[in-house]
Image: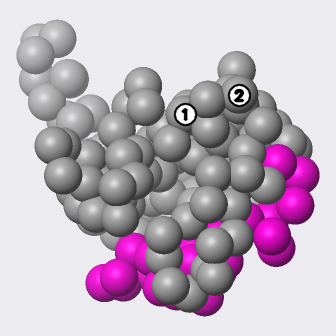
Amino acid sequence: MPMKVATAALALALAACAQLGDDDLYEAAFSDVGGDATLDAVQRIFEQGRCVACHSGAQPQGNLTLARGETAGALLGEDGQGGVPSAHPECDGAPLVTPGVPDESCLWILVDEGLMPPVGELPEAQRGVIRAWIEAGAPVE
């Protein structure tokens, strides 16, 4: 009997997910983040948003790796204070992340203008988490 209950619960959960659009799923996945965005939440976005598909491995696009464990150094520099210049032509050498100032952060500029990811935009909920993380000073813990 417990197996039938578990199977029924799983079927209901899958049916509910099928009814949700991508934005709804992302809203649900990041509802616990709120205004207290973390590097971990941003990393999950990079993993789910196809970012690591291009920005990882031996030869990451733009020499920018967003693989888990390497993101903070890549975005914020070795000192964790930001200022790592972007190689992306749209950013004119702007830092990848300027903690506390999303509009001066290449990461946010590219996401906000829909240039990254190059195919499809990140859902609004994910974009909000990235912006909130930068606004909060891009904390690494």
Q: Residue at x 63, y 51 (%)?
A: 84
The one nearer the camera, 9 or 66, is 66
Q: Which residue is mark 2?
A: 79
Percent x, y of residue 103: 82, 73
Q: Sequence-wise, which precedes: disc 1 or disc 2?
A: 1
Q: Which residue is mark 1?
A: 73
Callout count: 2
Residue 93: image quadrant is bottom right
SS under mark 2: loop
Contact (Cβ within 8 Å) of mark 1 with mark 2: no
Percent x, y of residue 8: 19, 35
Residue 111 seen by the camera: yes
Q: Residue at x 20, y 23 (%)?
A: 5
Percent x, y of residue 54: 24, 61
Instruction: Give the spatial CA distance, label 1 vs label 2.
Output: 8 Å
Percent x, y of residue 1: 11, 12
Residue 57: image quadrant is top left
Q: Amino acid at mark 1?
A: Gly
Q: Quadrant of the C terminus?
A: top right
Q: Residue at x 22, y 36 (%)?
A: 10
Q: Is residue 103 above or below residue 80?
A: below
| Residue 9 in the figure: left or right of residue 94 | left
Q: Amino acid at mark 2?
A: Asp
